[in-house]
Amino acid sequence: MIWSNKKIAITGGTSGIGKATLELCLKLGADVVFCGKEDELVSLVNNQTKAKGICVDLSKQEGIEQFYDFVTSELGEIDILINNAGYVVVAPLEELKREDFELMYGINVIAPALLTQKFLPSFKSKKEGDIVNIGATGGSYGFEKGAAYASSKAALLNFSQTLMKEVRKDNIRVYHIDPSWTTGTNNNNKGGEIPLDQSRLTASDIAKVIINQLELPRRAFIPQVSIWSTNP
């Protein structure tokens, strides 16, 4: 793949897997736009890199519209959409609130679906495009205290599988990437990032997997990849 002419949109590009992927795409020569949920972090990435970002709330339709408009104004048609933004609250079922479920499903499932819906016509018209959805191993297996989060990622996995069957005939590749917990990611959206632990996967590990998948010949793709640490 020649990255220097690729145009990429990434959600959740201010930290963790999203930021690591953004940085690697830029290093390869791609043009990248991104969104984040905090003005300060969006400004920081804007100042530190050549990427262009906007602060939006993807749990709301307005935020989805704003990001789509921003992407098209900055890049026109894109080649790759990476649905990375996520929201997670890890807690026993009896402690979860309706708001927790709504936010997790809104950001983890509905936002990727609606953003994909917006970019799909251009992918279909040129018979080419890549969609990368970032899930979680918990979406396949579940985990304790993950009733809302794991089920939202299970829904995203099913969305990816269904979408793949709809658009494969148009030469559009749909990748579903399932990392286990990584350092440099927020494990509850409240308490900061998971501290560095050499036994855990890093965000850059996942970014490399994403790039490796995208660099497959256009006639090939791997629908689902799960990445585990060797010593959890």
Image (cartoon, rainbow, N blue to C red):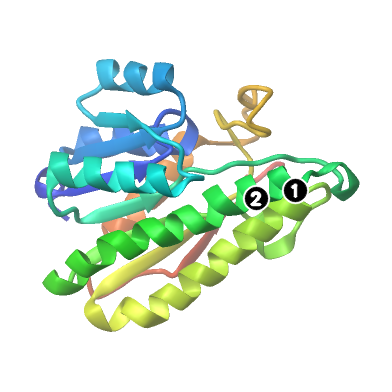
User: Residue tagged by mark 1?
Assistant: 98
Question: Circle 2 — which element?
Answer: helix
Q: Residue furthest right?
A: 94
Q: Nearer the viewer, residue 196 or 169?
A: 169
Residue 103 relative to residue 160: left or right: right
Residue 33 picture quarter: top left
Q: How many numbered circles does the render carry?
A: 2
| Residue 164 placement (x, y as % from top left) | 40, 75
Which class describes the residues within 10 Å of circle 2: few (<14), some (14-19), or many (20+)? some
Q: Is residue 175 above or below residue 12?
A: below
| Residue 231 placement (x, y as % from top left) | 70, 42
Question: Circle 1 — which element?
Answer: helix
The amino acid type found where label 1 is placed reads Arg
Residue 178 visible in the current orientation:
no
User: Residue tagged by mark 2?
Assistant: 102
Badges 2 and 1: C-beta atoms under 8 Å apart?
yes
Residue depicted at x 30% and y 60% = 118
Which class describes the residues within 10 Å of circle 1: few (<14), some (14-19), or many (20+)? few
Image quarter of the C terminus: top right
Q: Is residue 192 above or below residue 121?
A: above
Residue 231 relative to residue 123: left or right: right
Q: Nearer the viewer, residue 225 or 47?
A: 47
Residue depicted at x 26% and y 54% = 80
